[in-house]
Amino acid sequence: TYEDWEEGSPLLHEVMKKNEDKHFHIDDLSEDLQKYYRLQTDDKKDATPVYMQHWKKKFSKFNLLLGKFKILAKSIKDRTVLNKILNYFKKLKNNLKKEYTTLEIKADLNKKFIYVPLNFQPERTTSPQGDVFVDQILMIEILAASLPDGWAVYVKEHPSQWWLRGGIMYSCNRYPGYYNKIASIKGVQLVPINTNSFDLIHHSQAVTTVTGTAGWEAIVRSKPTLIFGYPWYRDFSKLFRIKDTESCKQALQKIERGFAVDQQDVINFLKSFDEATIHAYVEGFVDKISKLNKQESMDNISKIIFE
């Protein structure tokens, strides 16, 4: 548990210190983490996070069409259909998908590049956990200003941004001109949103994120990771915590010289994480894959809050 989101978990810090000189094996992990680790390190299996699978299914073309029919039927019934149609056409002029696709360039995987998967916004993963880097363009500008000669930055939008927020809708975090601003930064290019994230991780020199899952997926695949925020894996000892251009340049220089993540460090971190955490969930759809029922999950969460 956290008492301070900037400081992290005191218990995890304590356990990591206790385990720092040990050499754990994958068999020392709990059953669920063994399964997770093997999934992440097996290139033949689909390691897409369960929440992404959930949202992708929910926002499939069929479900979207069904949802539009329901809205249309309700609008006809309450006589607001004309107003909704007019509002729809007004929003078309701020089409974020169109802005993005006119700027995207297919990724050249033979080139040296840093992969930057954008965080979904607005969400606590960037506000507050991103601190000033809730503005992800600031992160990209620092990264671009720190690049070794001949390297590029590949930026990819988070698929859920359009699934959940809508391509013709925008919030304070995605506004008309947002993608134009990113694409205008020297050395930076937007890659198609359907580019496989694991392919980008595999071929990249490093992955950079505020707090995104892709940063951890890179670590598990022995790729260097630069974080600008405070993700759950922020205490892993072999990642780079970036605050400014100078720390970014130093990190990229180490990576250019051949720095890579050792899997022994990954397993040791997972073992410490295992010992310092409880089994529970808050997302409704996770109960479909968890061995805990809802009551057991609530009991575990309640117990740690009371303690």
Image (spheres, helix red, strand yellow):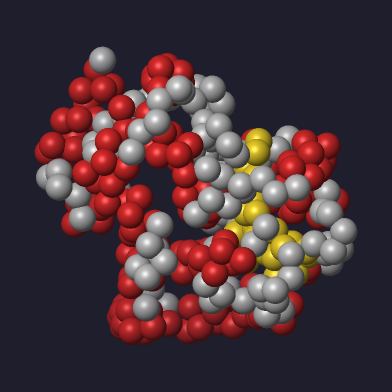
Whole-percent x, y for residue 203 in the image: 61, 66
Q: Residue at x 21, y 55 (%)?
A: 289
Q: Is residue 164 above or below residue 85?
A: above
From the viewer's side, name the closer residue of 63 and 190: 190
Q: Is residue 125 visible?
A: no
Whole-percent x, y for residue 123 in the image: 51, 47
Q: Is residue 194 visible?
A: yes
Q: In the displayed structure, does residue 240 sit left or right of residue 140? A: left
Q: Residue at x 26, y 41 (%)?
A: 27
Q: In the displayed structure, does residue 189 sit left or right of residue 261? A: right
Whole-percent x, y for residue 286 in the image: 25, 52
For the N terminus, give its image quadrant: top left
Q: Is residue 113 above or below residue 57?
A: above
| Total number of numbered discs in the rendering | 0
Q: In the displayed structure, does residue 139 sit left or right of residue 171? A: right
For the C terminus, give its image quadrant: top left
